[in-house]
Image (cartoon, helix red, strand yellow):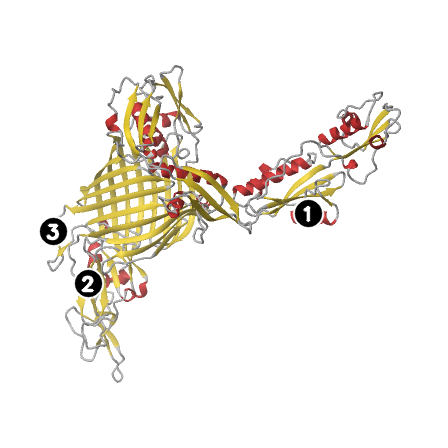
Amino acid sequence: MTSNLARAGRHSLVATLMVGTMLSAPVAAQTAPAPRPAGPPTPPALQTGQPASPAVTSPLTQNTIRSIRVEGAQRLEPDTVLSYITLRPGQPYTPESLDEAIRALYATELFSSAAIAGADTGELVVQIQENPVINRIVLEGNRRLKEDKIRPEIRLAPRQIFTPSRVRADVARIVELYRRQGRYAATVEPQMVRLDQNRVDIVFEINEGPRSKVRQINIIGNDVFSDRELRSEMYTRESRWYRFFSSGDTYDPDRLAADQGKLRQFYLTNGYADFRVVSAVAELTPDRRDFIITYVVEEGERYKFGDVRVDSALRDFREGSLDSALPMRTGDWYDAKQVEDTVELLTSTAGLVGYAFAEVNPQFARNRETLTMDITFQIADAPRVYVERIDVNGNTGTQDKVIRREFRLTEGDAFNAIAVRRSADRINSLGFFQENLQIEQSQGSTPDRIVLAANVEERATGELQLSAGFSSLERFIVNGSIAQRNFRGKGQTLRAAVNYSSYTRSIELGFSEPYLFDRNIQVGVDLFRRDLNSFQFGLGNERQTTYQNVSTGFQLRAGAPLTEYATLIGRYGFQVDDVSLDEGRFFLNGQCSPLLAGRYLCEALGNRATSSLSYSLIYDTTNNRLRPTNGNRAVLTQDFAGLGGSVKYVRTRVDLDKYWNFGSGFIFSLGVEGGYIHSLEGRREDADGNELERVRLVDRFFLGQPQIRGFDIRGVGPRIRRFFYDTTTTDPDDFISTERDQIVQDALGGRAYYLGRAELEIPLGSGARELGLRPSIFVDAGAVFGLTRPVLTDIRTPVDIPLLDAAGLRQCSIPASGTTPGSVVPIQPGANCPTGATLLISQQIPAFREVYTGDTPSPRVSVGLGVNWNSPFGPFRIDLAYAVLKEEGDDTQLFNFNVGTAF
């Protein structure tokens, strides 16, 4: 619509915006805006072909104004026009005073033309043409920047008076927007489309141009460090084809200044205290598309630390008591970053004993002859500070007590910097407010009083999710959940979830109260029903459902803190498990057949109840429980089953995690976990006296995707693999195939497992961050093992399964003879078919051999790349992992993704 409007206007009444200067000329992003004129523009009547006033060209014998009137005024009153000039009837006038009046009219920017006639008679006529009124503002050609980003920068608006200076200013603002996006080749061409009634449409024609990249970074004057080392320290990167996810190779003058600071910081960190950047120049390439940046530096000499000490005026620190705490020593290479960290360390140390406003000022004494730097950290005297009050602001739905109970200080306590930081971490961990909340500190009513303020910004804590998607693990997925993590503003959690996929179905209800009766005691209850359809890989590599496990139960939990960082949580759970098989597929004579299902599946069948008492001991120093970037977390969990029910065991698990924030968005995490389950039941034997595994199938540990990426679900650990003999050959040990898609295998799990993971989250440019992309590289390692070796089956010839009648008896087919028709007769157990009769066969089981593999603690290792993406259609996780170490029988998986469901 806007394009049609502009074209129509150009065919008819398209005018330039500036008289004589052609405002419609493009304004290039790489060209500095033209300077504003020192005064009002020269009247067009004096520079174009219009008749000049006689008062300007011919002297008069009588120069008195007899009358004065206005012509051409439409919206303005004539008196208003005359108020802008000093000419009045009865006053003398000169050519200079007439010129001054015209300049005054142009200075108002209300008129497109102005002239004064009648200078020869003294009857002056002020002839004006008012500037048009803006009808609307139209943007054309903006694809990279949407209108909602540009329009707030435009000062012109409909129903305003058009002025060329305002148009020029808006053009400059739009150009600056594109410069901030790195598009220095962008141009903006304003056009004016005249309408009736002295109205105009203003059309800004935008040519965005390509994003200006940094083609090359040159560094001159560096001898100690190479260009490559110095470029790696900068925010700006040279443009390369593989940096399509990064915005670091886009030219940004602000980043250029920041890079100079990075260079100086790098050299100062390595001891070059005299380093300086002589110049930094950015030049456009001849094609005006990219920039070449050149730095000229002076490295100077390298310094070492000289005498380093602390001079404290605080009475709590004796002279020299802090010297031993300093990280640097005389003779070490000078490191400016270490000095900054020491200032922060001393400030925090003073804050620990209540000196919130202690100032630490490092004093430097440079010795150019010995190339040493003496430093004295001076701590000025300050009063011990106490908390006067704690303010909570911005919480509209969350009750004050929910925030205040996370503070590790109360009003009247001595100030403690670590307690303040810990309070901020605990508030951030709630997940109710903006990320990286900081507690502000301000001077109280007296110098020894401080006010702490938590200025929170609430975010949505209710979650309603209805999603569908496809997972490489579970195929089709449908999820529905509703949760409120801050129910009634009291910090309570109320949730309900329904999940449905090709292999799992579940419904769960839960409620948590973090502070029971306003005491630091957390309680909760969960109700659940989970239907798991386990599967095996059958012929053709197809997933075939094996057993179904339906779990129904509840769990009660309660917890309390032991220390600031340690918490003890106790739980009681009761659940009933019903393990079943498809009788039509796996049963013979009403019994589970090991030939069809396998011995381990037949052993797992039945109902059983588990009554368990559990506890978890948690030590958590992370800065955020939801998405930690720093700190440690250790969890010890033990489950004791046997307080009633039919299952008895002790299960122990340990989980250790540590997080490091390396700055600039790099987050490194290291995790180790392991577990062991010990059965308290007696020896189990089958009918032949063979020992059976005492830990039931559904209680064992399983390992695979997603715990250890690079392997399929339950793809690691003990398993039974069924190979089929080739009975058409003379070799009795010849199999039809040993390929995965030609065998059947079942994962058995294990009594013990361990798992290690290391992951580095890599920051991307601002554009990728806005998309919610968080890539990472990772290494996973683990194993599950420790089962009693199962009894295996080896059948060298196919087995015929007889056809049974309703009474469970075998049936024989007697062929027709003469006039006697054929018939089917049952036979008793142990008897043979009559002479000439044939035993009826329902199916034939091919000859096979079972092999037990994977029961070893040898580590399986995978490496890979993963990306989290908060996509418009839901959270998305993709992993590309390669199994470096694996064992025989393990199932690997190179690619895995989940979409349409929460992680």
Q: Is residue 101 above or below residue 615?
A: above
Camera-nearest residue between 479 and 424: 424
Camera-nearest residue between 835 and 842: 842
Report helix, strand or loop for mark 1: helix
**How far across and down, in percent of the image, does residue 425 sit?**
34, 32
Distance, label 2 to label 3, CA atoms, is: 24 Å
Kind of residue indicated by mark 1: Ala
Which residue carries the number 2 mark?
851
Which residue carries the number 1 mark?
6
**How far across and down, in percent of the image, does residue 99 sit?**
78, 29
Mark 1 neighbour density, 10 Å: few (under 14) some (14–19) many (20 or more): many
Q: Left or right: where does residue 175 sit relative to residue 214?
A: right
Verify CB contact (< 8 Å) between mark 1 and mark 3: no
| Residue 862 appears in view | yes
* Among numbered discs 1 and 3, the one appearing first in the sequence: 1
Distance, label 1 to label 3, CA atoms, is: 90 Å
**How far across and down, in percent of the image, does residue 779 sit?**
29, 50
| Residue 766 appears in view | no
Distance, label 1 to label 2, CA atoms, is: 79 Å
Kind of residue indicated by mark 3: Arg
Which residue carries the number 3 mark?
683
